[in-house]
Image: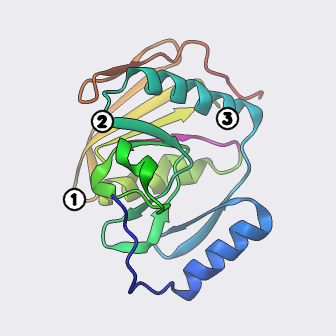
């Protein structure tokens, strides 16, 4: 499960990302060679992530677990990584000293659109997660009370997309899970 390679040497950009994260407390990611800093979560965003975590934790098969704020790299490139709000991967990741989950073990990533960084989640990350081969990307949007489920990544694009509104359940048949969106928080206008 671990991606640690004793021969790996961090690039200057990766060192800068880790230093910026340590200095600011913000979440750093390197997406296609660009250092991105994500704002701290609001209470509503954190509440949504907690709600989804609780639902997934109790419903997933034993071999899978949800992990909040764990990172996943682009296959073969640990200096190109994303840190979704929540990811589901092999339970063995909990025993790893690495902070990067093997993309081949990740079954689902969840992003909750933030008020100030919506383009990243709604546009940029769709292609990135497809390129990384992540099978399912769930995007929760508290701005309008909607969700979008992207599946079947191929050639840098998700081949299937379902869109729904809060109150409509999100079915994840490959995981044997149904996520309830009724009552998820919405941002104030």
- Classify 167 as above or below 135: above
The reply, left or right, for residue 66 in relation to residue 20 is left
- Tag shown at residue 155: 1
Badge 2 marks a residue whose secondary structure is loop
Q: Nearer the viewer, residue 175 or 3?
A: 3
Residue positioned 57% across, 33% down in the render: 141
Magenta-tinted stretch: 108-115
Mark 3, Cα crowd under 10 Å, few <14 / some 14-19 / many 20+, is many
Whole-number angstrom distance, CA of label 1 to CA of label 3:
31 Å
Q: Is residue 99 magenta?
A: no
Residue positioned 49% across, 76% down in the render: 33
Quadrant in which the C terminus appears: top right
Badge 1 marks a residue whose secondary structure is loop
Q: Which residue is mark 2?
A: 63
- Tag shown at residue 48: none
- Sequence-first tag of 1 and 3: 3
Mark 2, Cα crowd under 10 Å, few <14 / some 14-19 / many 20+, is few
Residue 74 appears in the rendering: yes
- Sequence-first tag of 3 and 2: 3
Q: Nearer the viewer, residue 122 or 65?
A: 65
The reply, left or right, for residue 62 in relation to residue 112 is left
Image x and y of residue 57, in percent: 46, 27
Residue positioned 31% across, 27% down in the render: 61
Q: Which residue is mark 3?
A: 45
Q: Nearer the viewer, residue 98 or 13?
A: 98
- Circle nearer the viewer, 2 or 1: 2
Whole-number angstrom distance, CA of label 3 to CA of label 2:
27 Å
């Amino acid at each position: 499960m671990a991606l640690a390679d004793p021969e790996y040497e961090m690039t200057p950009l990766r060192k800068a990302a880790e230093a910026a994260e340590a200095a600011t407390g913000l979440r750093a990611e390197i997406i296609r060679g660009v250092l991105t800093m994500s704002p701290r979560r609001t209470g509503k965003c954190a509440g949504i992530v907690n709600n989804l975590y609780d639902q997934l934790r109790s419903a997933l098969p034993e071999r899978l677990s949800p992990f909040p704020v764990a990172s996943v790299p682009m296959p073969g490139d640990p200096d190109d990584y994303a840190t979704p709000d929540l990811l589901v991967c092999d339970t063995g990741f909990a025993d790893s000293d690495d902070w990067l989950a093997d993309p081949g073990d990740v079954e689902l990533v969840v992003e909750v659109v933030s008020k100030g960084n919506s383009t990243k989640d709604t546009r940029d990350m769709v292609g990135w997660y497809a390129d990384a081969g992540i099978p399912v990307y769930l995007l929760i949007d508290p701005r309008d009370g909607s969700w979008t489920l992207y599946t079947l990544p191929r050639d840098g694009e998700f081949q299937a997309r379902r869109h729904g509104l809060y109150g409509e359940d999100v079915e994840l048949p490959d995981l044997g899970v149904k996520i309830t969106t009724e009552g998820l928080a919405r941002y104030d206008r």
